[in-house]
Image: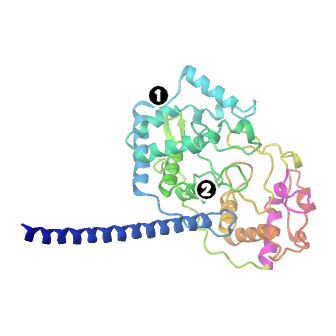
Amino acid sequence: MRKLINPLLSLIAIALVVALWAYHWASNSDSASNSDEGSNSAKETESYRPTLEHDPPVPDPPKAAVRDFETFLDRLRAASETNADSLLLHRDALERAEQVFRNSVGVPDDVPIEMHRPFFTIDPEAVFALYFDLPTLERGLGLYQQHCSGCHGTYGRGNGSATQQWYAGNFPRNFWYGKFKSRSTRYGVVPTDSDLYRTLTRGLYGSTMPPFRHLSVQDRWALVQFVKSLANFYDDYDEVIVNRFDRKADRSKSAALDVGDEPPVTLDSVTRGRVLFIEQGCIKCHQGSKSKPVGLARGEGGFTNWTDEMGRPIGHSRNLTTRVFLSGAASSDLFRIISGGPTIGPMPSYQNIPNEDRWALVHYVQSVFKPDYPQAPASADALAHPPTTDDGKSDSAAANGSGEE
């Protein structure tokens, strides 16, 4: 018996040594993995700082997230076609929704309610009910209520409780309208998934919208899909509910903007940009008769029609000298916002002017806050042909503007 015990003890000892070695190896492997993950997280945090002048790549969305959103669209279409009334507010509930809209922070009393009814007629709880067994949207709803509802409202209508306390003319988006400033698509067209992910990750620099880099990539993609699921309106002519991100219902067929390669910054490109800044009417809102493009208050120059998607007043135009841009400070960011326009507010799209002219505008705007850039001479203003007013005269604001010395 003793002869059997000794070999058995030896085997047990060997097994313990192997187990300890395996545990030690696994621990080191996990530590290295966590270190790499932390390093990657730090790199992403650095790359998504909105003041940096490069545009970080956006990861591909998880296939499961895309699949869940497509399933939601299928359910929305089916419910809309068979019984659209089940997705709508009626009688007292609709009256309360109208009253909530009227009481939403910043909405003027004279805003016609009829223009907005297609968006708030839909019952948000009925939309949420379509999320059953769709983990991405269920997760997105929970994340939204935790991180976003304080500003954007419980149902994403842009009227969260925080807006009553510290917003001043910088109102949060109403997601039901499907209108977003930071996009790579044409004017009035919904943004791409990458656009939404970029905004969610970086935040909107110069506003109260913070970055959400602290959330995992999967959680950010869940929020992206959730926000898209809110962009619904009721087409009372066809009596159907339409989601603005539904490609089957999209008649614009607009592809994402191809930014391409930026041409070199030269004195000619900056000067050309200054001329275009005057000729395209940019000076009317961003400079007027001031010496630099420091932005104008809403009432300056007679502008009283600056409003957002809910008819709320926009207080001022962007001060281009501060290097603070909602959509980011990279050249590609400026190219996107100039090309497609913000959709919200008075700024138009410049998609129809040549790419080289749009890049010239980018270079001029950058020269305003970059003293090391070539500076457009004051004589550049004389080369411009300002847009004419209704009486056929040159715009006085443009005529009084001056370039950088």
Task: Give, as a three-letter code, the residue at label 2.
Answer: Thr
Query: Residue at left 68%, top 67%?
Result: 52
Specify the quadrant that holds the C terminus: bottom right
* Residue 275 is inside the magenta segment: yes
Displayed quadrant of residue 256:
bottom right
Residue 170 percent across, percent down from the top left: 73, 45
Residue 109 percent across, percent down from the top left: 75, 29
Residue 295 percent across, percent down from the top left: 83, 55
Judged from the image, the secondary structure of the residue bearing numbered disc 1 is: helix
Task: Give, as a three-letter code, the residue at label 1.
Answer: Asp
Q: Is residue 22 left or right of residue 117?
A: left
Query: Residue at left 82%, top 74%?
Result: 271
Question: What's the magenta region?
Answer: 267-296
Query: Residue at left 43%, top 53%?
Result: 66
Q: Is residue 106 left or right of residue 143?
A: right
Q: Is residue 296 visible?
A: yes
Q: Which residue is mark 2?
A: 199
Q: Is residue 394 visible?
A: no
Residue 85 numbered mark, or none: 1
Of badges 2 and 1, nearer the viewer stands 2
Residue 72 numbered mark, or none: none
Q: Residue furthest front?
A: 2
Of 41 and 108, the residue lying toward us: 41
Q: Main secondary structure of the magenta part?
A: helix
**What whole-number distance in Å separates the C-alpha atoms at marks 2 and 1?**
34 Å
Q: Is residue 112 above or below residue 183?
A: above
* Residue 309 is inside the magenta segment: no
Of 350 and 123, the residue lying toward us: 123
